[in-house]
Amino acid sequence: MGVFKYYCFLFTCAIFRVDSRDLPPFLKACSISDPKLNVCALKNANEALPSLFKANKKLGIPAFDPYLLPLLEIQTSNFLIKLDNVKFYGLNDARVKAINVNLKDSIWSADVEMDRVNLVGHYIASGNIASFPIRGDGISNTTFVGGLYKYTVHMPKRMKDGVEYFSINSTSLTFKLKRAHFYHGNLFNGNQQLGDALNNFFNENWELILEEMGDAIKKTIQAIGTSVVSKIVDNVPANKIFLP
């Protein structure tokens, strides 16, 4: 089991500066009495995505194409990979395929499709992956193809200043891919033969490599989603997010 570290500066984490007690204008509320609540939530979510992914200075929303991440570390007992100045491409092409709002148990979930998520950045790596040695310092390019991501959040209500708000208690993310591609430049001090051999092994055995590295990337995408949700529910009362 690996561990990961997810770092960000203030301007990348503070995705929203939402005026307290009001939804951002591009988000529409659904009624909890609507028998098709999930259908309403799905429709409103997809209509909001284009505005969500555009940079908006008034709301404090950074650009999502690319989404910038200063540092990401992937570490197990066998290897360490440090990525810096990571750029995420493809998040702005997300499509919500299903939403399930379970207000009784305070559990919300969303199934999101992203055809292609691309992570590009500088890496430093050492250790062994799948019994193969890895040592390098260069450009890393990882691409997830045909991804279906299921994000689940447990959000019970809490009182703040006499007003009910949703509060994130826990989150999880699972995903399935059709394919993954990996490239690490300047492996083994620039030895082209060894570098090509290792990159080919990674791509021929992408599912095995994903077991080793995917947890950190999964948790990073999960953290990005949670930062978006938390900025809304921390500032907007529950009765503004879901109308009677």
Image (cartoon, rainbow, N blue to C red):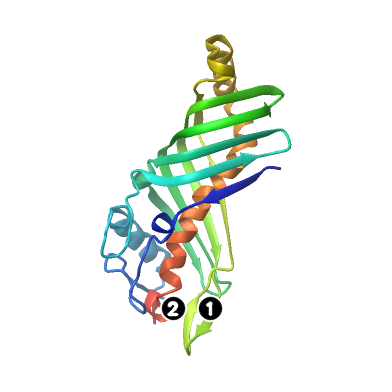
Position of the N terminus, as image quadrant, is: top right
Q: Position of residue 63 (x, y in %)?
A: 32, 50
Q: Amino acid at mark 2?
A: Ala
| Residue 176 seen by the camera | yes
Q: Amino acid at mark 1?
A: Lys
239 up-or-down from 185: above or below: below
Task: Determine whether the residue tagged by mark 2 lies in a helix, strand or loop.
Answer: helix
Say which label, 2 or 1, has the lower sequence index.
Answer: 1
Looking at the image, which residue is at 39% across and 74% down?
241
Looking at the image, which residue is at 60% across and 30% down?
125
| Residue 174 seen by the camera | no
Task: Determine whether the residue tagged by mark 1 lies in a helix, strand or loop.
Answer: strand
- Contact (Cβ within 8 Å) of mark 2 with mark 1: yes
216 or 241, nearer to the observer: 216
Residue annotated with mark 1: 157
90 up-or-down from 143: above or below: below
36 up-or-down from 8: above or below: below
